[in-house]
Image (tube, rainbow, N blue to C red):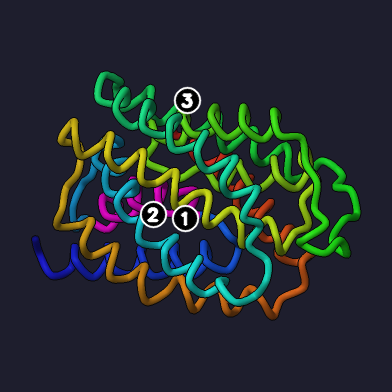
Amino acid sequence: MELDFIIVIFLIGFIGSFISGMLGIGGSIIKYPLLLYIPSSLGVGYLTAAEVAGISAVQVFFATIGGVWAFRKGGYLNKRLILIMGISIIIGSFIGGFGSYFLSDNTINLVYALLATIAAIMMFVPKAEVDDIPNEKVEFNLLVAMLSAFIVGIGAGIVGAAGAFILVPIMLVILKIPTRVTIASSLAITFLSSIGSTLGKIVTDQVLYGPAVIMIIASLIAAPLGANTGKKINTKILRALLAILILATAINVWIDIF
């Protein structure tokens, strides 16, 4: 690998992981389009959609570890929510990660665009004011939690994501989970999701390990920094940042597809 390619990949990983740790997402919503477009636009290298998905899957696995570690003592990790949604999403993400081997680059991009669009729409749906509910008193629909996590896992596994960029709005809007509990717990759930999607990509030999290692190093440094920063920012600002980020990415990918 050329030095300029290594530097660009590291910066993409660092910036994406900082934002993902701050907003409680795995980061593929940011890093997928950056990896797809930035190296080629700068003339330092080219990555296909399948290669980007493989790199993202491995990187998200480590990025979410850093984020969860930063939130471990905050009291916002809902173990019941993590267990129920985590089991469902790890099964779905393995199916998606394995099945993506048989899909074209255009199909992978299409799945990504659909997921980002749905997530963007959901982020603008009015949210119930439940942020004052303590973590230990949080209630949610078990069946909806299980099914939504499974479906999200399949789509996220295909694009090498952990699914938090759509899981977060589902938890906020449909399951009515408080924002800080959502951000912390979604990182733990997406960590489990990344196990399934990573295994699916590795088994089908879809991972470029050089760029993946660079992204991992950047993630382990940046994700905890982002998570600690997120604790100090107003929850309404965090939701607005996430909504804008998802919407901008969805529009960009649709433009590229058409």
Judge whether 43 appears above or below 102 on screen.
Answer: below
In contact (CB < 8 Å): disc 1 and disc 2: yes
> Residue 53: x, y in percent?
32, 41
Callout 3, which amino acid? Phe
Residue occupying the point 20% across, 39% down: 202
Which label number is shown at residue 173?
Answer: none
Badge 2 element: helix
Q: Which mark is residue 258?
A: 3
Q: Which residue corresponds to the image point at 33% horizontal and 32% vertical from the top-left?
A: 97
Front residue of this view, candidates 47 and 156: 156
Q: Which residue is under mark 2?
A: 60
Vertical comparison of 127 with 49: above or below: below
Q: What residue is shown at x 35% (from left), y 45% (from top)?
A: 195
Q: Amino acid at mark 1?
A: Gly
Residue to which mark 1 is pinned: 27
Disc 1/disc 3 C-alpha distance (Å): 24 Å
Judge by depth and name the residue closer to the eye, 42 or 31: 31
Position of residue 40 in the picture relative to residue 148 (left or right): left
Question: Which secondary structure type mostly characterizes the magenta part of the structure?
Answer: helix
What stretch of residues is rendered in magenta? 26-42
Image quarter for residue 237? Answer: bottom right
Quadrant of residue 133 in the image?
A: bottom right
Q: Is residue 213 covered in magenta? A: no
